[in-house]
Amino acid sequence: MGFLDPVEDALFVTAGLNSLGYPASFHLGRETAPVVAPGGFYAWVQCGGSVVSTTLPVREEYTEVLRTGKRGLPC
């Protein structure tokens, strides 16, 4: 225990990287399988096109439903 949930963690990492001048973006995705409930949501941070907040294969396992921040810039 003592860790933040994935959404809080990704928000803090995004804010921290942006405050340091890095073009980080916050992403929220819904689990691709199962298609029906109870599909889960997960949040991650990308910087320069790379996922930097987790080692999970979020791009393959989640459908992005929300993105905020900068994207496509080098990190």
Image (spheres, rainbow, N blue to C red):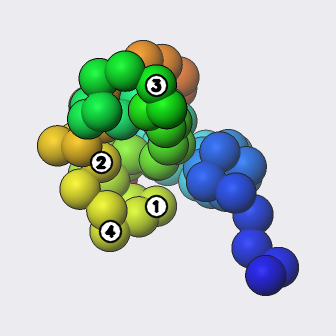
> In the rendered image, which quarter contains the N terminus?
bottom right
Q: Amino acid at mark 4?
A: Thr
Nearest to the observer: residue 41 or residue 17:
41
Q: Which residue is mark 1?
A: 53
* Residue 37: numbered disc: 3
Q: Earlier in the sequence, mark 3 or mark 1?
A: 3
Residue occupying the point 73% across, 49% down:
8
Instruction: Check disc 4: other Cα within 10 Å, few if <14, some if 14-19, many if 20+.
Output: few
Residue occupying the point 82% across, 79% down:
2
Q: CA distance from mark 4 to mark 3?
A: 25 Å
Instruction: Check disc 1: other Cα within 10 Å, few if <14, some if 14-19, many if 20+.
Output: some
Residue 6 makes an appearance in the image: yes
Give the number of the mark in front: 3 or 2.
3
Q: Amino acid at mark 2?
A: Val
Nearest to the observer: residue 48 or residue 13:
13
Residue 29 makes an appearance in the image: no
Nearest to the observer: residue 25 or residue 31:
31
Q: CA distance from mark 4 to mark 1?
A: 7 Å
Q: CA distance from mark 4 to mark 2?
A: 8 Å
Q: Which residue is mark 2?
A: 58
Q: Amino acid at mark 3?
A: Ala
